Amino acid sequence: MNTLIAASQRPCLAVAPMMDWTDRHCRYFHRLLAPSAWLYTEMVTTGALLHGDVQRHLAYAEREHPLALQLGGSVPEDLARCCRLAEEWGYDEVNLNVGCPSDRVQRGAFGACLMHEPELVRDCLGAMRAASAVPVSIKSRIGVDELDSWAQLENFYRIVAESGVQRVIVHARKAWLKGLSPKQNREIPDLNYQRVYRLKREFPLFEVIVNGGITAAESISGHLQHVDGVMIGRAAYQMPWMLTECEQLMADSAHSAEHDQPDRDQILEQMIAYAHAQQAQGVPIRHIGRHLLGLYHGQPGGKLWRRQMSECLQDHSAAPESWRRQTIQSDCPEYA
């Protein structure tokens, strides 16, 4: 069965949770580029929320909605308490990380480790759903270590489905818990989109969002013939303008009429204004500017601007106005 998304239904566009990258300043920038995309926080562990600085981990700008909090943890009661916090703070979704293969999550026995324990995942999701009215989702891999067959993935999600969870985000690679770094786990295991497509066919009530290896807006149309949405990862950070292209491709004509997409220079001006407001609250502007380095990727003068921007970020006394592009020789290969 080919699950073709109805033309009248807007598919889901999402930006992946990325450690050290998708902080609140990055998400604000991405929201300007893609007004309707779902944005996800960096993974926050239950311990950090329950025993740490809640304000630091959960604060965000209202403009970021729709916004999901991604949690790392494996104790149902702790995850439930964090869901209640997410509801208090006004998050639109809480996502359980069942895909990260880092040493940190392995030491804590969560992330991709949980693919070995589908019953525990079911219980975690069930406790999360019972704790608050905020929708709960899961982000997983297609397999882990030697658990790498369709039968094993089907069994995992058949058990997970008992929790009542509906949104399922699947990175179309398996994870190796030993022998590969987190970076290698994003690149070396083969992509298997067909397995994600089959998951949608076998579990039609799931909202299935595919993640992994999506680096061009033009490629998403093929995915949307089979699943309900796409999640963009590193490409959204390194080539952020791709988000505007995805937004335009996925929007229906009515939605497109609602949003007049600014150009890159206008986005930059909005981020300069945002940086001023944040600077007044004591935020170093380099924490904001670092997320903008890919804004002019592939554009005439893009390399020169990136160099200029990098120099500004090194100068702690530089004002946000210094981010504006200098006059360039657009026909000079050095600046292309």
Image: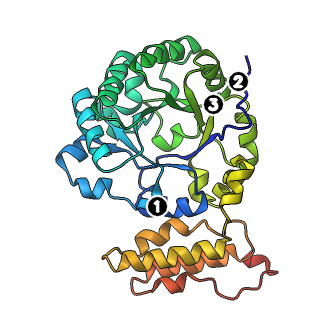
46 lies left or right of 285:
left
Say what secondary structure mark 3 lies in.
loop
Residue 236's place in the image compared with 100, above or below, is below
Q: Residue furthest left?
A: 51
For label 1, the residue is 63
Q: Quadrant of the C terminus?
A: bottom right
User: What amino acid type is highlighted by mark number 2?
Assistant: Thr
Mark with earlier residue (3, 2): 2
202 lies left or right of 80:
right
Say what secondary structure mark 2 lies in.
loop
Q: Quadrant of the N terminus?
A: top right
- At 37% from the left edge and 59% from the top edge, which residue is drawn? 60
Checking the image for residue 190, the label placed there is 3
> Between marks 3 and 2, how big is the CA–CA gap?
24 Å
The 10 Å Cα crowd at callout 3, few under 14, some 14 to 19, many 20 or more, is few
Task: State the image coordinates of residue 8 (x, y, percent, origin top left).
Answer: 71, 38
Residue 156's place in the image compared with 274, above or below, is above
Mark with earlier residue (1, 2): 2
Q: Is residue 249 visible?
A: yes
Q: Is residue 172 visible?
A: no
Foreground mark, 3 or 2, reads 2
Mark with earlier residue (3, 1): 1
User: What amino acid type is highlighted by mark number 1?
Assistant: Arg
- At 63% from the left edge and 55% from the top edge, which residue is drawn? 243
The residue nearer to you, when weighing 185 against 226, is 226
User: What amino acid type is highlighted by mark number 3?
Assistant: Asp
